[in-house]
Image (cartoon, coloured by chain):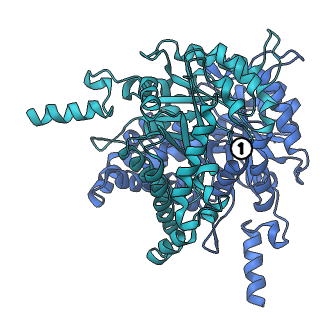
Chain colours: A cyan, B blue
């Protein structure tokens, strides 16, 4: 009995057990804000492994051990990611693995995705699964269980990917969001809904002017604000966050006002052209409210920094994080 | 040399080789339309395996063979899908496996997804991967390679999932679509872009009235029409299709006019409440232009048809397809 209680306590402390067991989960926004404070940085490291940029000593070692090229690629990715995670975990609160770069290696790639999530969490990092999943009803529920919950099968309850948060796409409306929100509540997880993305053609849909006034991305902001309204944590933020690109600072400024309780996940810094001044409008005046992501600029920093060779890719990543931290501290 | 030529010819006939080798791929729309004609039906069978609805004799046999519950679930899914595919492949041109029901079982589930695609193609079915993937630039390219192309790794070129078509989400604009279109051209594949979905809250975004006139889904229709304009095949259709729900016949009618060259993938028939009359506006007067999907209504027909027990689930599925064929023939 004592053992069970200790186990439940451990589970509670690591936020891995749901309301189903009558334990109220900690709000994801509070978890994230605490981690940002503890690490003294609002940086998210994107783990988008591209095989042709992973140092050769890693890819070649993996190929020696595994004959199947997808299995070898998966092994190389895990090895590479572990190096990055070891180098940056003391400096940043979270990482964001982009699933497309794992799916491209089939089932072995998805195994590498899971192992990356597990390893990052073992180093006390919050993991945002960047999957931009979306569907309706029972299908959305299946995605929510896969990434932010448990799969019930053969009388067991087991997590398929068990990330801390997931990016989702809003085109299907509330039906496509509700199952994710329910899992967030039950398992203490979060979502980040695409609102204003960082790419050049994001305006095709997102900037359309509406008859009732305002633009599409503003309506999306209002919807996201309403979807999270019931679940505001102690930090003043809720677990329904928003993706707002660093490349559109004016729109970000508007969205910061529309969604006062949403944490912004901000892509587009660095490789996509956004700088510290561009991400500033995503933060509130007290310095809270956003997480700025950088992927290639950190993980493959060794390619551009002549102080480091391929074998020092992790050290180069750490230095890039420190430089980014310094850059962001200006604002 | 003769051998190589024969091999190239075989590859060409099975549409598995790209323009990179100076062979022009057959347009996906032509392939799909030929298959519809050959099978005499415009039905797509959705393969959304839910473990609690798969007959027990299958799930139990899988559990006896595999200790790991995810591996056992994956084995049960493949066995179940093979039964359905064997029963329906002579009657329908295509199947549509919904990836969420595979991702929920982690990497083993994704292996089952691949094996389902391969098995369906071995029975001459066209496979629409229902993944609603979306991202920008190089990330969208990774998804496109994963589902509609080849992964280059360790000097090899190998397909991760190799479906014939993929559903995609448009919220990111053209940047998020272009990499898929390029792969469609190179590998003879297709995409279906979400335009007007079948769910109750699809109007949250899709029905918003625009300042310039019209509603959001109409603009989406215009965009989809323009994205496919350069790639119209001999059948008069292009490989950029649209998802248009059976539950909104009036909007479907408008969209049929806006996108004269797009094949509609129509969910919402049967379990979601759409009937033959509701899907009628998705077709042109000559009876071409749409594929109507049914998932649960076919694959789990045995649960509702007292003529069949769980062991005859495949026969029940075949009977359900025949009933649907008859129902659709009215229009």
Q: Which quarter of the rendered picture does the N terminus of chain B lie within?
A: bottom right
The secondary structure type at the circle numbered 1 is loop
Relative to A161, is B259 above or below?
above
Q: Which quarter of the rendered picture does the C terminus of chain B lie within?
A: top right
Locate residue A131 relative to residue B197 in the image: left or right.
left
Q: Quadrant of residue B65?
A: bottom left
- Furthest toward the bottom, the residue is B1
- Depth check, front residue: A272 or B298: A272
Q: Quadrant of residue A273?
A: top right
* Parent chain of label 1: B
Residue B57 in view: yes
Percent position of residue A19, x then y: 31, 23
- Depth check, front residue: A120 or B266: A120
Q: How many marks?
A: 1
Percent position of residue B140, x then y: 69, 48
Relative to B50, is B253 above or below?
above
Percent position of residue B276, x then y: 69, 29
Percent position of residue B252, x then y: 77, 27
- Depth check, front residue: A144 or A311: A311
Locate residue A92 relative to residue B158 in the image: left or right.
left
Mark 1 closeness class: few <14, some 14–19, many ≥20 residues within 10 Å: many
Q: Name the residue carrying label 1.
A: B136
Residue B323 in view: no
- Furthest toward the top, the residue is A212
At x 46% / y 59%, what residue is drawn?
A: A78
Relative to B35, is A266 above or below?
above
């Amino acid at each position: 009995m004592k053992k069970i209680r200790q186990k439940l306590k451990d589970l509670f402390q690591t936020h891995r057990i749901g309301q189903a067991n009558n334990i109220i989960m900690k709000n994801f926004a509070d978890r994230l804000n605490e981690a940002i404070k503890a690490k003294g940085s609002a940086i998210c490291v994107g783990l988008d492994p591209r095989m042709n940029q992973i140092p050769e000593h890693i890819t070649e070692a993996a190929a020696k051990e595994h004959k199947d090229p997808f299995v070898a690629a998966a092994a190389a990715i895990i090895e590479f990611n572990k190096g990055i995670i070891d180098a940056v975990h003391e400096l940043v609160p979270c990482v964001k693995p982009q699933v497309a770069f794992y799916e491209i290696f089939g089932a072995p790639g998805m195994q590498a995705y899971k192992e990356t999530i597990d390893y990052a969490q073992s180093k006390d990092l919050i993991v945002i699964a960047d999957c931009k999943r979306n569907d309706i009803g029972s299908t959305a529920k299946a995605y929510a269980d896969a990434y932010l919950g448990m799969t019930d099968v053969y009388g067991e309850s087991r997590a398929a990917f068990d990330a801390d948060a997931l990016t989702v796409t809003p085109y299907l409306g509330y039906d496509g969001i509700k199952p994710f929100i329910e899992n967030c509540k039950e398992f203490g997880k979060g979502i980040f809904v695409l609102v204003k993305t960082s790419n050049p053609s994001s305006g095709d849909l997102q900037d359309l002017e509406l008859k009732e006034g305002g633009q599409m991305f503003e309506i999306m902001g209002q919807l996201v604000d309403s979807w999270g309204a019931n679940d505001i944590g102690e930090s003043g933020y809720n677990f329904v966050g928003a993706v707002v690109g660093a490349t559109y600072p004016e729109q970000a400024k508007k969205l910061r006002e529309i969604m006062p309780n949403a944490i912004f996940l901000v892509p587009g810094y660095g490789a996509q052209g956004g700088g510290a001044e561009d991400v500033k409008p995503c933060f509130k005046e007290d310095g809270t409210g956003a997480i700025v992501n950088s992927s290639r600029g950190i993980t493959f920093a060794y390619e551009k920094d002549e102080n480091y060779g391929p074998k020092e890719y992790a050290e180069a990543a750490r230095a890039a994080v420190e430089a980014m931290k310094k850059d962001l501290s200006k604002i």
